Amino acid sequence: MTGLNLPQFKAEIVVPTLNAIGLGGDAAVNLLTGTALVESGLVYVQQNGGGPALGLWQMEPATHDDIWATFLSDSRLNSLTRTMLSIRSNRPAGPQQMVGNVSYACAMARLKYYRAPDPLPAANDALGQAHTWKRIYNTSLGAGDVDPAHVALFRQAIEA
């Protein structure tokens, strides 16, 4: 299985996307890079095995739609997130954009974390990032666990 080059992914996709929506910083960059590694291995843009999750961050359409319906009334975040939508994409505006539009998928994943009241863990805290991913992103209903393999992926994201 192959995937994207991790340092390039972090520097060329995650950093500029988070900066563009004003929600960057080392802690956020490492958390979002690690989340993509844990969720898709930087390989799958649709959930392996036929599930509903989409994009490198494997966000479910219901989560995507809920962020728009219940959180993005803030005009600054609303308009900044809309700038991520690609008119060149063959995907409609909505959850399907996350399949081929990595900037938009990254922005939506960051908003999932941002709307939670929890502060982000330190930029170099792989275990803390893994716990934050499980608690906020994967949730208690998700199949993921905070285990050595997932912590190692967050460590890779930090070191990239």
Image (tube, grey):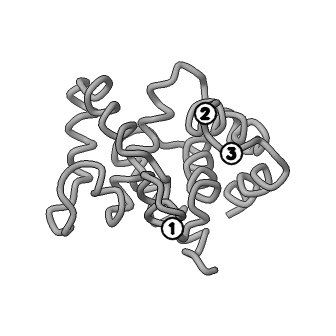
The spot of residue 127 in percent (x, y) is 79, 41
The amino acid on which the numbered mark 3 sits, given as a three-letter code, is Gly
Is residue 146 shown above or below 3? above
Q: Which quadrant of the figure has residue 25?
A: top right
Residue at figure coordinates x 71%, y 52% from the top left: 154
Q: Residue furthest right?
A: 148
Which SS class for mark 2? loop
The amino acid on which the numbered mark 1 sits, given as a three-letter code, is Tyr
Which SS class for mark 3? loop
The spot of residue 160 in percent (x, y) is 67, 64
The amino acid on which the numbered mark 2 sits, given as a three-letter code, is Leu
Q: Which residue is mark 3?
A: 144
Q: Residue furthest left?
A: 87
Per the rendering, the mark at residue 44 is: 1
Cα–Cα span, label 3 and label 1:
16 Å
Per the rendering, the mark at residue 145 is: none
